[in-house]
Each structure stands twice: as structure tokens, then as C-alpha cells.
Image (spheres, rainbow, N blue to C red):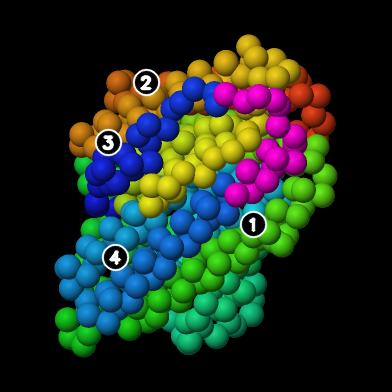
């Protein structure tokens, strides 16, 4: 799973630049309610930016479907790449907020068995002991068999993708919706392994009539249209959850102590189990490009960097929106500083160090050494660069745990990962 196309440094420079800053002066320690209100405002701003970028992606893919060409495919890919930084900066809201965690799989689930969606190369194989839909190829078929029952897929709609195909048969790898399904439809598989290059789907996979390659170009367009429409509606739902009367905001404010625990749970779990473990250490241990996050587009360096920026946003209570405007206010950093200023200083330093390590990964990628190349077996310098990012995430997680203790918060469970905690299990 992969592709061509690099995100230029300019694509995320506006977000990253100037994001490190000193603690804001404050006459008094803010209340938990004030901290949570600003946290919710940042979530609302982040998901609103993600929604705006998803709408732009939807428009770009509609243009590709209506008038397929090299130019419209390139524009759709660029719209996808532009959508990723703002969404990735929202991921720290996931783990501590059940409303977000229950929803997240619809928009950012990975890795996926892409043979469920469309044609794949012979090297992908034809079957899997774990997934009967491994090569179901919805684009090419009018019906598929799920758990022994025939499912009509003749009309590809958002409802079909979300209600029938997403995790079909109870298999998590059957990802039918969200950013990565769209990514696959725009780039196709990356068949370069850990060598240079990403996915190379031709624009003619959406062409009309005899110019169509890959077969079933009309249905491929229908799938892409349904997936992008669904991404927009899913993000509209999450924006609503963070508005003044939204369920996610209300759940935070109903119990401020649990709300503060949610902030640190999200920061710690994204830092440790999810990003350091599942998204990075696993791929590094296996030297496997199939384990990188944006594996079709070779955009992983951008997504990882923006995850780390998002963690820092939440701790410091400051988010720079896509239009350059800043949302900022009382932060959990101030509560930590009031109880244990040394721990606050440690966390701020660790967060800045993590951002620096991920900027180094991104710089290497922008220089021509994509993330999948950096984790390749035998690439000692690339492996060390990625491991330095992992180590920085682990270090900041330990400081976050000390902040939890300093605040006397209960109910904080930071997710782990076999890749970090039980590496032998990875190879079994």
C-alpha cells in the first residue's frame, strides 16, 4: 500500500512555524472549567478546519470524476494532502473522549486490506486466512459474500460504505471509509517497498469509455464520490459535538476532574501506545512499509509531525488555525505549573524536543528519503532518526504521567503497545 507525491515543507510550515512559546503570564491559576472550555474551543476549531479541508477535497474529487485528467488527479491528491495536517492535529482529542474514540475509525482507520475496495497487484495475493473479503473488490462486483450472505453492492453509496462495508464481517482491516480509503483511490498501491516512489494510479482509472484503465471506472468514481461525501458528513457530525451544546463538550464540562483526566489521557495515549508504538515502532521492528500510516501517498512524515504538534497544542492551550488565526486560552499547563513547576518545564521541553525530532524526519522526507525508506532494513541513519522520534515520545509520556500524579487525577489510563511493551509478541 503506497504512492507517489511528496508533501512540500511549505504544506505544514505555516502550522509548525512559531508554535513553540513560553508560558503565558497569568495573575492566577485558571479554574478547571476555564481550561476545559478552551480545550473544547481548540477541538471545535480543529475539526472545523478539517471539515473545510474535507469540503475542498470533495470538490476536487468531484472535478476529477467529472473531467478525468492528469491535472484533475493531481489537484485531488493535493487537496487530500492539504487535508491531513489539520485533521492530524485533532487526534489528541481521541483517546480521552469516548465520543471521539467511537467515531474515529470512520475517518482515520488503518491499516486496510485495500483489495476489499479495488483491484490490487498480484503481489498482494488472492486470499487471507484472516479476511474472506481480502480481494472482494467492490468496485468490480455487483455483489459480494459477507459471512456466508450475499450483499448487494450494485449501487455504491455513503450508506453502503458506512453501514455494510466498514469493518465488514467484523474485520478491522476492512476499512471502507475515511482518509485512507480515499488515499488508496487517489494513489493506488505503493509497489516500491522501501525504495523510492509512492503509488502510481493513472488518471485513466477514472476515464470514460475505451480510455478507462483498471476496469469499472464509473464505479471507481462512484466509490470515491461516496467516500468523500461521507468524510464531509462525518466531520460535520464531530464539529457539532464540540459546539456549545454539543455532546463532547457537555461530557467534559459535566465532570471537570474527568475532563482534565481526558486531556492527559489523550496526550499520553497518542504519544505512547498509538504513535510511538503502533504507528512507528511496529513498522521499524518489521522494517515494513505496510505499517506506515499514509502508506499509499508517502505522506506519513507530515501526519506524524502534526500529531506531535497537536499534543503540544493541547498542553499549551494554543492552536493556530488554517487561516492563521490563533485560538488560545487557559491551559492544563498552567494547572501543572501551579502544582509542580518543574514538571511543567519538563513537559514543555520534552514537547519541543519531540517536535524537533519529527521535523528532522520530515526534513529527510522532503529531501527525498520518504518515511518508508527511513524504516528500511539496513538504513541505519534513517532507523536511528525514527527511533529518536519514538524515544522522544516515550520521554514526554513519562513526564505526562508525572503531571497526572502532581494533579492527583484518577481515571487516567495511557494505552500501551506490544511494539513497546512486549516486542517478542510482534514476531510471533
Magenta stretch containing residue 352, yes or no?
no
Q: Check disc 1 and report its element: helix, strand or loop.
A: loop
Q: Where is residue 306 in the image (x, y as percent from the top left)?
A: 43, 40
Label located before the other in sequence (2 or 3): 3
Segment colored magenta = 25-41
Q: Which of marks 4 and 1 is in front?
A: 1
Few, some or many residues within 10 Å of mark 2 (<14, 14–19, 20+): some
User: Whole-Å distance between the Cαs marked 1 and 3?
Assistant: 34 Å
Judging by the rendered image, the residue that carries numbered circle 1 is 242
Judging by the rendered image, the residue that carries numbered circle 2 is 384
Asked whether 185 or 147 is in front, the reply is 185
Is 126 displayed left or right of 334 in the figure?
A: left
Label located before the other in sequence (1 or 3): 1
Q: Where 204 falls versus 359 (above or below)? A: below
User: Whole-Å distance between the Cαs marked 2 and 3?
Assistant: 14 Å
User: Whole-Å distance between the Cαs marked 4 and 1?
Assistant: 28 Å
Judging by the rendered image, the residue that carries numbered circle 3 is 365
Few, some or many residues within 10 Å of mark 3 (<14, 14–19, 20+): many
Amino acid at each position: 500500500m503506497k504512492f507517489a507525491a511528496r508533501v512540500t515543507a511549505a504544506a505544514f510550515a505555516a502550522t509548525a512555524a512559531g508554535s513553540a512559546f513560553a508560558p503565558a503570564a497569568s495573575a492566577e491559576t485558571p479554574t478547571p472549567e476555564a481550561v476545559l472550555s478552551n480545550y473544547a474551543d481548540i477541538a471545535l476549531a480543529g475539526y472545523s478546519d478539517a471539515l473545510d479541508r474535507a469540503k475542498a477535497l470533495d470538490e476536487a474529487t468531484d472535478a476529477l470524476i467529472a473531467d478525468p485528467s492528469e491535472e484533475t488527479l493531481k489537484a485531488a491528491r493535493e487537496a487530500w494532502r492539504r487535508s491531513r495536517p489539520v485533521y492530524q492535529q485533532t487526534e489528541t482529542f481521541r483517546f480521552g473522549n469516548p465520543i471521539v474514540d467511537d467515531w474515529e475509525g470512520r475517518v482515520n482507520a488503518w491499516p486496510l486490506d485495500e483489495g476489499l475496495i479495488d483491484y490490487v497487484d498480484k503481489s498482494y495475493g488472492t486470499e487471507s486466512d484472516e479476511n474472506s473479503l481480502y480481494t472482494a473488490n467492490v468496485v468490480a462486483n455487483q455483489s459480494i459474500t459477507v459471512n456466508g450472505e450475499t450483499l448487494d453492492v450494485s449501487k455504491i453509496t455513503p450508506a453502503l460504505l458506512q453501514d455494510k462495508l466498514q469493518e465488514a464481517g467484523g474485520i478491522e482491516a476492512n476499512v471502507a471509509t475515511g482518509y485512507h480509503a480515499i488515499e488508496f483511490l487517489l494513489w493506488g498501491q505503493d509497489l516500491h517497498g522501501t525504495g523510492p516512489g509512492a503509488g502510481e494510479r493513472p488518471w485513466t482509472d477514472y476515464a470514460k469509455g475505451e480510455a478507462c484503465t483498471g476496469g469499472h471506472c464509473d464505479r471507481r468514481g462512484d466509490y470515491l464520490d461516496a467516500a468523500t461525501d461521507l468524510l464531509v458528513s462525518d466531520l460535520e457530525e464531530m464539529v457539532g459535538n464540540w459546539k456549545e451544546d454539543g455532546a463532547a463538550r457537555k461530557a467534559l464540562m459535566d465532570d471537570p476532574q474527568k475532563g482534565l483526566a481526558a486531556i492527559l489521557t489523550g496526550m499520553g495515549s497518542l504519544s505512547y501506545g498509538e504513535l510511538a508504538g503502533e504507528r512507528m515502532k511496529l513498522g521499524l521492528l518489521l522494517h515494513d512499509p505496510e505499517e506506515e500510516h499514509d502508506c499509499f501517498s508517502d505522506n506519513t512524515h507530515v501526519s506524524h509531525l502534526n500529531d506531535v504538534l497537536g499534543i503540544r497544542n493541547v498542553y499549551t492551550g494554543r492552536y493556530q488555525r488554517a487561516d492563521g488565526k490563533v485560538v488560545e486560552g487557559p491551559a492544563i499547563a498552567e494547572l501543572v505549573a501551579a502544582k509542580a513547576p518543574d514538571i511543567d518545564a519538563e513537559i514543555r521541553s520534552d514537547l519541543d524536543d519531540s517536535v524537533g525530532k519529527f521535523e528532522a524526519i520530515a526534513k529527510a522526507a522532503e529531501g527525498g528519503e520518504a518515511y518508508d525508506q527511513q524504516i528500511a532494513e539496513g538504513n541505519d541513519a534513517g532507523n536511528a532518526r525514527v527511533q529518536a522520534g519514538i524515544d522522544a515520545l516515550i520521554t514526554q509520556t513519562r513526564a505526562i504521567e508525572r503531571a497526572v500524579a502532581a494533579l492527583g487525577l484518577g481515571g487516567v489510563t495511557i494505552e500501551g503497545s506490544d511494539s513497546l511493551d512486549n516486542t517478542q509478541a510482534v514476531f510471533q
